[in-house]
Amino acid sequence: GAELIEGTQHASDVLSQNENALLDQLTQVIEKLSHLSTRDPALEGVVKTLSEGEILIREASYDLGNYLKHSDLDPDTLAEVEARMSLWHETARKLRIQPETLHTEMESVQAEIKGLEEGFDVEKLQKELAAARQAYETQADLLCTARKKAALALSKRVTESMQTLSMQGGVFVVDVAKGEPSAKGSDNIEFRVAGHPGVTPQAIQKVASGGELARISLAITVNTVESTPVPTLIFDEVDSGIGGAVAETVGRYLRLLASNKQVLCVTHLPQ
């Protein structure tokens, strides 16, 4: 693997590639001893042995160079291969199969995907999707139109009821605006209220007090009771801050609701 190539390259570097490589140093030693052997023939045997060794080392260095030259894998490539092999084994472990069967598993999955893709006519599905979207938008537009019509009628009736519930000059508005498509249409619906004349209606939860909110809820419920499937109605402090004729009106509305609903009232007043 990578260790083999790295080790071989290191040996080649030490023998002949690096600065002060072994062959360079050996050549210098042989030259020095050859010069000295002219003075002392006893060194000739040493020079001969070293020269033979130089030839062998040079041949070995040449062979190492050829080995590296004809090797198809460099250290980086080997490291990449080893990383892929590690991933291969890790994937097999996660799938709880043997590494040697991983390619078979992959072929099986690819065949399954191909079968699924061939089982769907993409162009046909796109046409069906476009048709379904068009049908949805048509119905959503019809629903929006109906909602806006109903919103105007409900706004008028609730506003009229508010005048009898100590909110003279108050206005109730059902705002129908375009929203994100959903199973219930593509409208955003918000209840807005103005408690006094000349005030721009705002979101009901931002401007109505507890008592006002209860009376507005009462007005809404009275005007929608026939289409309200809820069997029990609960009003919290619907009589807060009122008395006299207004209290009588509240009582009359509650009695009307109680004719076919269960009505519970939370109050802090003895009336």
Image (cartoon, grey):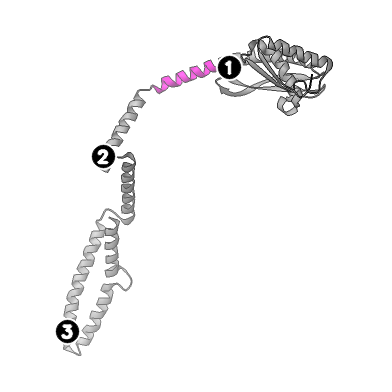
Occupied quadrant, residue 151: top right
Residue 131 falls within the magenta-colored stretch? yes
- On screen, residue 238 above or below 103: above
* Residue occupied by mark 2: 101
Disc 2 element: helix
Q: Which of 47 and 126 is in front in this view?
A: 126
* Residue occupied by mark 3: 44
Disc 1 element: helix
The kind of residue tagged 1 is: Ala
Occupied quadrant, residue 167: top right
State how far apart marks 1 and 2 are (Cα): 54 Å
The kind of residue tagged 2 is: Thr
Mark 1 or 2: in front is 2
The quadrant of the image that shows the N terminus is: bottom left
Q: Where is residue 100 in the image (x, y as percent from the top left)?
A: 25, 42
Mark 3 or 1: in front is 1
Q: Nearer the viewer, residue 58 or 109?
A: 109
108 lies left or right of 143: left
Q: Position of residue 101 (x, y in %)?
A: 26, 39
In primary-sequence order, the first of circles 2 and 3 is 3
Occupied quadrant, residue 205: top right
Mark number, residue 140: 1
Residue 121 visible somewhere in the drawing: yes
In primary-sequence order, the first of circles 1 and 2 is 2
Residue span colored magenta: 121-137
State how far apart marks 3 and 1 are (Cα): 108 Å
Mark 2 Cα within 10 Å, few/some/many (few <14, many 20+)? few
